[in-house]
Image (tube, rainbow, N blue to C red):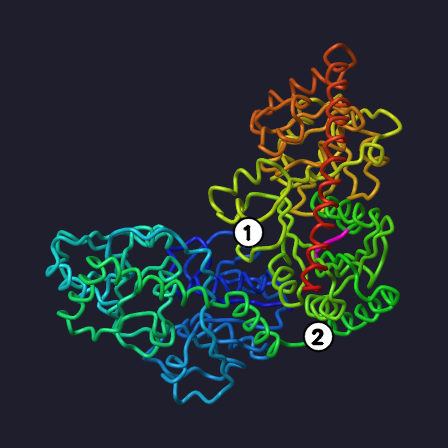
C-alpha cells in the first residue's frame, strides 16, 4: 500500500504525545512493508530527507511527493488547516483523520475513517457519524522502561496539564523535589524553589528521574505519559478524567484536581511508605505488561488497508500467490521461510547476499527453505537462485501465504523484521532476526524478543548492547557476511581503480577526486543497488558500468585497487570479495571495515583526497609494496574463509536447535 501522511512535523522535534503516536503508527506501516511519504505542514524548508525508512518532504514540495507516491491513502491530523487544504485537492483519495485531542473545533468533515485514542475522545465529537476507529496509542514498554528516580514529576508546564496544581503541591511539600517538563505555552505560575523545570527531551531520561508521576490535567484524550511511566513501575496520581480512566484502569490513583489536600496526602504516603509504594508500583508494572504494542500496530494497519484505494497491484499479488502455491505443492510446510524486502539476483547489496548464503547453508544441510520478497516489483512471481526458491508477494499476500504454510522458523531483517517476528508468534513458529547495522531502526525489532539474533559483526553487537538491554538476554551469534573466495576470485588481474556504488555515502566524490588527480590511471565505477547514483561528470579515464550479478567477471577481473571511502559500513562485503582476488583495498576507517579487513587494509580518512591519491600511487605499480599488499589480501581472505566455515556451521546448528525445541514444544 502507498500512503501519504500530511503532518505538522515528523522526526527530529520535541516529542509530544501526538507526534510520538503518529510516528509509531507510521513506523509500524513501514515495518509491515508499506510505502509511506510524509509532507510536513510546518514552515520547514530545504530538501526532502529520509527518516525511519520514510521520505519526508517540506510543505512546498507536496506535489512532488504526490507524483512520486501516487498514494492510495492519505493520513492527516485534525486541526491541521494546511493538511485539510491538500486533502480537498485530492478528494478522490481515501482519507484517514487522526483525532488526537478534544478540540473546540468539533467538525471532523467526512474522512473515510477517523481514528480516536479513546472512547472518551470519540464521545467528545458526538456529531460525527462517519466510520470510526477507537484504538489506544501504540506504546512499547521496552522503549520506556528504566529505574525510577526520586522526584515527583509533571509532564507539561501548562494549566491544561496541571502546572497550577503542582505549584500548590510543591509549596506545601518544600522538602520534596519536583520535576516539570516544559511544553508549548507559558508556565502559569511562579514555581517554588523545589521545582526543577527542564526542556522536553528523551522520555526515558525523565522517568529515570521520576518516583511518582502527577497528572492533574484539565483535559486528556488518553494519558500517554502515565502509561509510559507505568512501564517502569512508576505510580501515577491522576485527575479522574474519562480518557485517563480508559488508559490506566485501576492501576492509578484518581484525585479531583482541586483537592490539593488529597494530592499532598497521597504523594506523601507513596514517598514515605515503602509498602504502599511497592503495591502501587506493582499495579503499574502489571498494567504496562498487558499492553499489546504489536497488536495495536496490526489493528491500525488493518484499518488503513480497509479504506485504501485498490489498484492493479492486487491482481499481481493474487497471481504471485498462485505461483507460490504451485511452487510448494510438494512441500506445503517449509522448515524455514525468510520474509524480506529485496532478494538476489535482482538486488545484490550486502545484506541480500548474506541472507542468501545463509539460506543456502540451511538447504545444503537438508532443510526445506523458501525466500519471500515483498518489495520487488521488477521480479517475476517466482524464481530460483543457486537452488533456493524465491517468490515475490506483496505484504498482505505474503502474510496470508506464510500463515497458510506455517513454517517452523521465520527469518527476516530490515523492513519486514517486526512483521515477521509478530507473525511468527501468531503461528507458533520460531523467529530469527538478522541485524546488519547499529542503527536504531535495525535494532528496534529486538523489543519483540525474537528467538535468535544474528549480528553481522562483533562491533555491531558491542555498539547496541549499552542501548538495548535485550542484546545481553536474547540468544545470539555473530555471522560475518559470508564470502566464499572461490566464487569471487577473478581469473585475471585488472588495471582499474574501482568504486562499487556511486553514491555520496559510499565515497563517489573521493573516487572522482582521485581520478581527477591520476589522469593516466584507468578508473571503474559500478552503479549500486541503493542510494542516489552520482554519474556525472565522467572523466576520460573513467568507465561506469551498471549493477551486475557477475562481480567476478565484470568487476574484480578488471580491478587493480579497490577504493572504499564509505562514511558508514557495518562490514564491507565488497572489500572482502576483492581480497579473494588479492586486490589491495584502501578504506575509510569505519568500525565495520576495520573488522572486515584487519591488517590487510590501508585506512585513510575519506576527506583526505591527497592521501588517497598517494596510496593509489603506492599500491598500483608492481613492486615490493604492492606484492606485500597482495599477499596480505590473500592471507586475510583465507583467514575469513576459515572463520566463515566455523560461523556458518554455528548458524546451521543454531537453526537445527531451534527446530528441535519447536518439535519438543509441539510434543509437550
- Judged from the image, the secondary structure of the residue bearing numbered disc 1 is helix
Numbered range of the magenta stretch = 339-343
C-alpha span from label 2 to label 1? 30 Å
Quick one: quadrant of the N terminus? bottom right
Q: Is residue 48 visible?
A: no
Residue 139 in the image, given as x and y percentages of width and height = 45, 64
Q: Label 2 crowding class (10 Å Cα cut-off): few <14, some 14-19, many 20+? A: few
Along the viewing direction, whichever of 278 and 441 lies nearer the viewer? 278
Q: Quadrant of residue 504?
A: top right
Quick one: quadrant of the C terminus? bottom right
Q: Quadrant of residue 321?
A: bottom right
Q: Is residue 434 visible?
A: yes
- How would you classify the magenta stretch by its main secondary structure? loop
Residue 377 in the image, given as x and y percentages of width and height = 75, 61
State whether residue 574 is above or below residue 289. Answer: above
Residue identified by numbered label 2: 311
Q: Is residue 460 left or right of residue 530?
A: left
Which residue is the extreme one toward the front? 668
State whether residue 319 is above or below residue 438. Answer: below
What mark, if any, has residue 149 been given in the picture? none
Q: Quadrant of residue 253?
A: bottom left
Q: Label 1 crowding class (10 Å Cα cut-off): few <14, some 14-19, many 20+? A: some
Q: Earlier in the sequence, mark 2 or mark 1?
A: 2
What mark, if any, has residue 441 been given in the picture? 1
Residue 474 in the image, given as x and y percentages of width and height = 57, 49
Amino acid at each position: 500500500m502507498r500512503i501519504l501522511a500530511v503532518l505538522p512535523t515528523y522526526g527530529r522535534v520535541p516529542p509530544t504525545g501526538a507526534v510520538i503516536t503518529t510516528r509509531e503508527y507510521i513506523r509500524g506501516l513501514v515495518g509491515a512493508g508499506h510505502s509511506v511519504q510524509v509532507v510536513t505542514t510546518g514552515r520547514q524548508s530545504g530538501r526532502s530527507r529520509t527518516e525511519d525508512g520514510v521520505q519526508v518532504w517540506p510543505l512546498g514540495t507536496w506535489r512532488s511527493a504526490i507524483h512520486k507516491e501516487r498514494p492510495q491513502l492519505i493520513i492527516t491530523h485534525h486541526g491541521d488547516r494546511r493538511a485539510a487544504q491538500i486533502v480537498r485537492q485530492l478528494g478522490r483519495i481515501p482519507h484517514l483523520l487522526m483525532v488526537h485531542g478534544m478540540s473546540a473545533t468539533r467538525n471532523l468533515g467526512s474522512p473515510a475513517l477517523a481514528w480516536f485514542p479513546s472512547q472518551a475522545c470519540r464521545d467528545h465529537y458526538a456529531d460525527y457519524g462517519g466510520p470510526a476507529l477507537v484504538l489506544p496509542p501504540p506504546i512499547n514498554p521496552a522503549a520506556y522502561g528504566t529505574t525510577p528516580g526520586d522526584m515527583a514529576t509533571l509532564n507539561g508546564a501548562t494549566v491544561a496539564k496541571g502546572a497550577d496544581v503542582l505549584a500548590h503541591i510543591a509549596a506545601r511539600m518544600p522538602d520534596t523535589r519536583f520535576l516539570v517538563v516544559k511544553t508549548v505555552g507559558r508556565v502559569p505560575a511562579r514555581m517554588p524553589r523545589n521545582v526543577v523545570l527542564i526542556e522536553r527531551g528523551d522520555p526515558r531520561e525523565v522517568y529515570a528521574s521520576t518516583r511518582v508521576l502527577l497528572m492533574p490535567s484539565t483535559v486528556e484524550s488518553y494519558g500517554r505519559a502515565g502509561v509510559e511511566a507505568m512501564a517502569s513501575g512508576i505510580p501515577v496520581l491522576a485527575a479522574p478524567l474519562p480518557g485517563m480512566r480508559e488508559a490506566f484502569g485501576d492501576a492509578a490513583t484518581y484525585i479531583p484536581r482541586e483537592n490539593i489536600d488529597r494530592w499532598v496526602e497521597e504523594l506523601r504516603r507513596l514517598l514515605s511508605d515503602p509498602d504502599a509504594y511497592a503495591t502501587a508500583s506493582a499495579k503499574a508494572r502489571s498494567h504496562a505488561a498487558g499492553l499489546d504494542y504489536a497488536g495495536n500496530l496490526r489493528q491500525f494497519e488493518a484499518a488503513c488497508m480497509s479504506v485504501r484505494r485498490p489498484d492493479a497491484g492486487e491482481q499481481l499479488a493474487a497471481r504471485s500467490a498462485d505461483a507460490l502455491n504451485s511452487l510448494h505443492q510438494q512441500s506445503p510446510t517449509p522448515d524455514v521461510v525468510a520474509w524480506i524486502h529485496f532478494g538476489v539476483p535482482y538486488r545484490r547489496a550486502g545484506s541480500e547476499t548474506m541472507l542468501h548464503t545463509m539460506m543456502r547453508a540451511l538447504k545444503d544441510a537438508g532443510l526445506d527453505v523458501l525466500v519471500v520478497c515483498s518489495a520487488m516489483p521488477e521480479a517475476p512471481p517466482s524464481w530460483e537462485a543457486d537452488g533456493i526458491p524465491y517468490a515475490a508477494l506483496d505484504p498482505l499476500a505474503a502474510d496470508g501465504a506464510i500463515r497458510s504454510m506455517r513454517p517452523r522458523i521465520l527469518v527476516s531483517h530490515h523492513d519486514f523484521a517486526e512483521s515477521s517476528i509478530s507473525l511468527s508468534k501468531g503461528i507458533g513458529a520460531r523467529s530469527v532476526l538478522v541485524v546488519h547495522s547499529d542503527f536504531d531502526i535495525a535494532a528496534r525489532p529486538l523489543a519483540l524478543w525474537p528467538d535468535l539474533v544474528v549480528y553481522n559483526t562483533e562491533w555491531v553487537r558491542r555498539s547496541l548492547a549499552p542501548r538495548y538491554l535485550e542484546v545481553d538476554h536474547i540468544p545470539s551469534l555473530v555471522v560475518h557476511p559470508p564470502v566464499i573466495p572461490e566464487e569471487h576470485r577473478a581469473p585475471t588481474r585488472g588495471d582499474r581503480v574501482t568504486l562499487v556504488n556511486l553514491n555520496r555515502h559510499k565515497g563517489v566524490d573521493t573516487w572522482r577526486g582521485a581520478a581527477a588527480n591520476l589522469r593516466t590511471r584507468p578508473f571503474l565505477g559500478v552503479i549500486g543497488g541503493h542510494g542516489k547514483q552520482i554519474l556525472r561528470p565522467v572523466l576520460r579515464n573513467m568507465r561506469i558500468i551498471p549493477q551486475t550479478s557477475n562481480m567476478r567477471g565484470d568487476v574484480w577481473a578488471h580491478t587493480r585497487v579497490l577504493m572504499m571511502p564509505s562514511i558508514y559500513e557495518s562490514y564491507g562485503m565488497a572489500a572482502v570479495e576483492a581480497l579473494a582476488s588479492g586486490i589491495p583495498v584502501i578504506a575509510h576507517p569505519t568500525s565495520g571495515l576495520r573488522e572486515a579487513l584487519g591488517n590487510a587494509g590501508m585506512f585513510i580518512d575519506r576527506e583526505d583526497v591527497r592521501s588517497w591519491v598517494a596510496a593509489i600511487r603506492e599500491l598500483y605499480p608492481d613492486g615490493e609494496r604492492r606484492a606485500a599488499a597482495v599477499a596480505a589480501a590473500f592471507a586475510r581472505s583465507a583467514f575469513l574463509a576459515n572463520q566463515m566455515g566455523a560461523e556458518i556451521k554455528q548458524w546451521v546448528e543454531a537453526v537445527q536447535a531451534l527446530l528441535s525445541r519447536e518439535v519438543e514444544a509441539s510434543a509437550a
